[in-house]
Every structure is written in structure tokens, then in C-alpha cells.
Image (cartoon, helix red, strand yellow):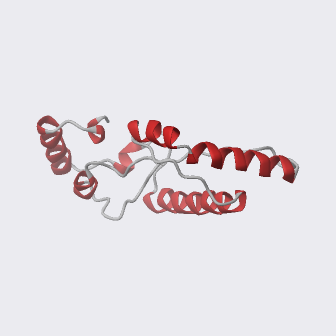
Amino acid sequence: MTEPARHPDQCNELGWTNLVTSSWQGVLVPSGTPRPIIEKLHAAIVKVLADPAIQARMRNVGAIAVASTSPEEFKAYMDSETAKWNKVIQDSGVRAGLSANVAPDAAQRVALAKRCAAEPGPSCLR
């Protein structure tokens, strides 16, 4: 999981007042993988992510090492994230290739451009 956005006020300026997001990664296996293999893989991942050296390396790149307590917990998390982002997509009307549907208005673009000129950051990379 990565750190929250460093410039949340810019999201508010763009009208995204309730946006809470992070990125995450996981290890998936094919359907039908025997349970003992899944458990062995999960245990190895938990062990690696608990290693202080691994946690430090991840923190150095802005990530937080988090392991699920079980494969089922991770599946539930993936399901909830999928439902959340499906709703965002449906509610916003955004479609692939039609970024104008979520583009800021002219005043918001000017405000963001001024902020990025004064304080470049990750949200300025558009």
C-alpha cells in the first residue's frame, strides 16, 4: 500500500472532496490451486513482509508493507475495492478515452497550474 496523496487539497480543488485512495499489490493463484499450496504461499509472504529490512526498503519508496491475515481477507478486500471503484466509474460517467468527462473546469485548471508552478508534485504530472 502506498502513502496517501501528498497534496489532498488539490483533489478538493478539483471537486473530489471524498476521494480516499491507495495502491496495493497482491499475489494471486489460479482457481483450483490446492489449499496447502495457498497456505504455504501466504505464510511465506507474511514472513517476508514482517522482515524489518523489507519494511524499511518499502518505506524508502513510499510503501507500507501490509499482509492480510488470510487469503479470504485479501479476497474480501479486493472485492470491496472492485465494488468501490466500479461505483466511482459508474457515478462519474467516465469512459476509456473520454477524459473530458472528469476534466476540471477552466478556473480549476488555472488554480492547479498556479499551484504546480509554485510547488511541483506528483499530482502535477497529468
The x, y position of residue 122, in whole percent, is: 30, 38
86 left or right of 21 in image: right
Give 80 or 85, whichever is nearer the viewer: 80
36 left or right of 87 in image: right
The x, y position of residue 15, in whole percent, is: 28, 59
Q: How many marks?
A: 0
**For the point 59% across and 63% down, which residue is it?**
80
Give 65 or 19, whichever is nearer the viewer: 65
The x, y position of residue 61, in whole percent, is: 40, 36
Height in image: 75 above or below 115? below
Height in image: 73 above or below 120? below
43 left or right of 53 in image: right
Give 57 or 99, whichever is nearer the viewer: 57
**For the point 60% across and 60% down, which residue is it?**
77
The image quarter containing residue 112 is top left
The x, y position of residue 84, in whole percent, is: 53, 62
Height in image: 73 above or below 49? below
3 left or right of 53 in image: left
Viewport quadrant of the C terminus:
top left
**For the point 43% across and 46% down, which residue is it?**
2
**For the point 28% across and 48% down, which residue is it?**
6
